[in-house]
Image (tube, rainbow, N blue to C red):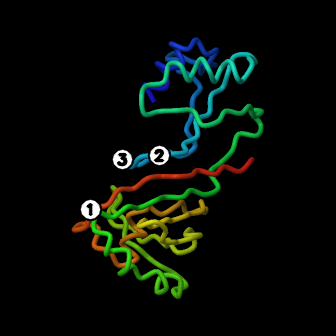
Amino acid sequence: MRTIERIIRRANIPIAMSKGFNPHPKISMPLALGVGMSGEDEILELELLHHEPLDLLAERFRRQLPEGICIVSARQIPLSERGAVDNVTYKIIFKNKDILQTLKIEDFWKQHSVIIKRMKKEGQKSVEIRSSVQKIGREDDALFLTFRLTPDGMPRPEEVVSALGVDINNELFEIIRTEVNISSV
């Protein structure tokens, strides 16, 4: 987030600030990216002090971006229409490509409920993840997972990979969030 704040400052973007003793820029990312994951389609929401042409703002922002970060698109939305995450898609790339053939995808779909154990500060908690999983697919030597946000939250990609029969402690894989979809509130 500090990188984004620096980019905004350098690009002279008229960002709104929070009120109070320690004001900070009104910036949000609807869904934080997990540690060790990369993202291809992240959403960044900025609240501006006043209207400026979107193409000029995007170009000023683009010129300040470090290598490896790019703006795919920019659009203006009213504050009343700020979105909530609807669903996300992850791409899982296994170092051992043979793992894709051992996944128990059909078994996963046959179950009405899939309960996993999640460690919390208070101890172990049982979490139902089946209702959040919208889609599981294999394509181009990768596994694709699409999750919907439910009142109980959303599973972590590694939790679903584990539920598909992979020993996540012994297999190397890369997780890339490829898409974040928001719905108007």
**Does the rendering let one see residue 185?**
no
Which residue is labeled 3 in the image?
35
Residue drawn at the location 40% of the way across and 73% of the way down: 116
| Residue furthest to the front | 140
Location of residue 65 with respect to 44 vertically, above or below = above
Give the image location of residue 19, x and y in percent. 60, 19
Which residue is labeled 1 in the image?
172
Give the image location of residue 10, x and y in percent. 51, 13
Residue drawn at the location 74% of the way across and 17% of the way down: 52
Q: Is residue 47 left or right of residue 34?
A: right
Q: Is residue 41 left or right of residue 102?
A: right
Q: Which secondary structure, mark 2?
A: strand
Which residue is labeled 2 in the image?
39
Label 1 with label 3: CB-CB less than 8 Å = no
Label 1 with label 2: CB-CB less than 8 Å = no
Amino acid at circle 1: Leu
Q: Which secondary structure, mark 3?
A: loop
Amino acid at circle 3: Val
Q: Which secondary structure, mark 1?
A: loop
Give the image location of residue 130, x and y in percent. 52, 75
10 Å neighbourhood of mark 3: few (<14), some, or many (≥20)?
few
Label 2 with label 3: CB-CB less than 8 Å = no
Give the image location of residue 102, x and y in percent. 35, 81
